[in-house]
Image (cartoon, rainbow, N blue to C red):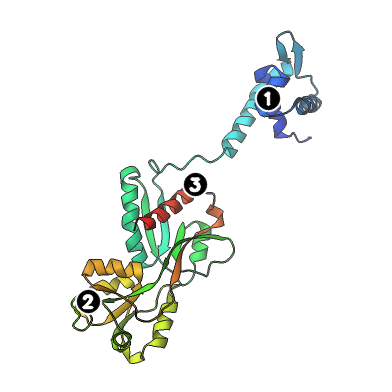
Amino acid sequence: MRSLDLRLLAVFDAILREKSVTVAGESLGLSQPVMSQSLSRLRDYFGDQLFVRTSEGMMPTPRALSLASSVGEVLGIVSQRFEPPQAFDPCTSSRTFSFFATDFAAAILVPSLMARFRPHSPNLRVRALPMRPKGMDEALESGEVDLAFGNLSEFGTGFYQTGIYHSDYVCLARGDHPEIRRALTVQQYLSASHALISPLPPGYDGLEKFLRDMLDPARIVLCLPNFFTVLTFLPQSDMLVTMPRRAGTTAARIIGAQVLELPVKIPGFDVKLFWHERFHKDLANQWFRNQVREAFNDR
């Protein structure tokens, strides 16, 4: 059986509806010659005139009338299956959005996100996941996780990225530190005891290498598993902690620590947002990306 171009069925349906080849062409955005050629192909395929010119317009033959319901059904199925995606409605959606981030990045972002979601999107859920040494790219590609953000470089082809902000580092000392107040000298920094987050999450390990190269090994007294543990030990310690600025200022606000500018030069870094190309046009993913960008801008 010869194949039939689905576009010809749209021509059939339009002529049946409008009773005019010209008007049908206008409704489809097709010229008169294209419509005439399409009608000729339809007649050839079905072996029938299908539409005959009368005083009341192009009227269907009995064969055309017998085809009408089937043509409408086929066009309906095609329209339903291939129509443009409906806009994502956060007000009614119960979707769970997920992202990879460091513990402190999640602590900074989540309150802003939830404040945005709750008034108008009460059914949305958020899942924050820790950075992984391996497998983040596969999770983003499969759709298991929507986004990743941080100082990341391991994502290769097939991923989109956009910059969120540039960060440098600051040093934290407890608020009533006996020797350090408001400012920090190079000598104080190099001679002080330091706590180090180790191992740092993917993308941040350059800080650990820099500090280990710069400081006397005896000055690194404590290694912590994550940024969050700074909150529990620093108020009772005279040690210093070097942290990304946003994480540091957030921690200092919670525990009343001093935020000190570094007296040594440590290169900063760019925090970026990453997603897989499979979901670049996904309306829900687009909406979530915008929410993350705006939440960080609120900080």
Quadrant housing the N terminus:
top right
Q: Identify residue type, mark 2.
A: Arg
Q: Which residue is mark 1?
A: 26
Spatial separation of the CA atoms under disc 2 and disc 3: 45 Å
Spatial separation of the CA atoms under disc 2 and disc 1: 75 Å
Spatial separation of the CA atoms under disc 3 and disc 1: 32 Å
| Mark 2 nearby-residue class (10 Å; few <14, some 14–19, many ≥20) | many
**Kind of element beneath mark 1:** helix
- The label shown at residue 155 is none
First-in-chain label (2 vs 3): 2
Q: Identify residue type, mark 1.
A: Glu
Where residue 18 appears, as percent x and y from the top left, is 66, 18
Where residue 184 appears, as percent x and y from the top left, is 29, 81
Q: Which residue is mark 2?
A: 174
Where residue 29 appears, as percent x and y from the top left, is 68, 29
**Kind of element beneath mark 3:** helix
**In this rendering, does residue 246 appear at all?**
yes
Near-viewer residue (197 or 210): 210
Q: Identify residue type, mark 3.
A: Leu
Asked if labels 3 and 2 touch by Cβ distance under 8 angstroms, the answer is: no
Q: Residue 48 appears in which quarter of the rendering? A: top right
Q: Which residue is mark 3?
A: 283
| Mark 1 nearby-residue class (10 Å; few <14, some 14–19, many ≥20) | some
**In this rendering, does residue 13 appear at all?**
no
Task: Identify whether 245 is placed above or below 241.
Answer: above
Kindly report which numbered mark, 2 or 3, lies closer to the viewer in this rendering: 2
Task: Identify whether 60 is placed above or below 87.
Answer: above
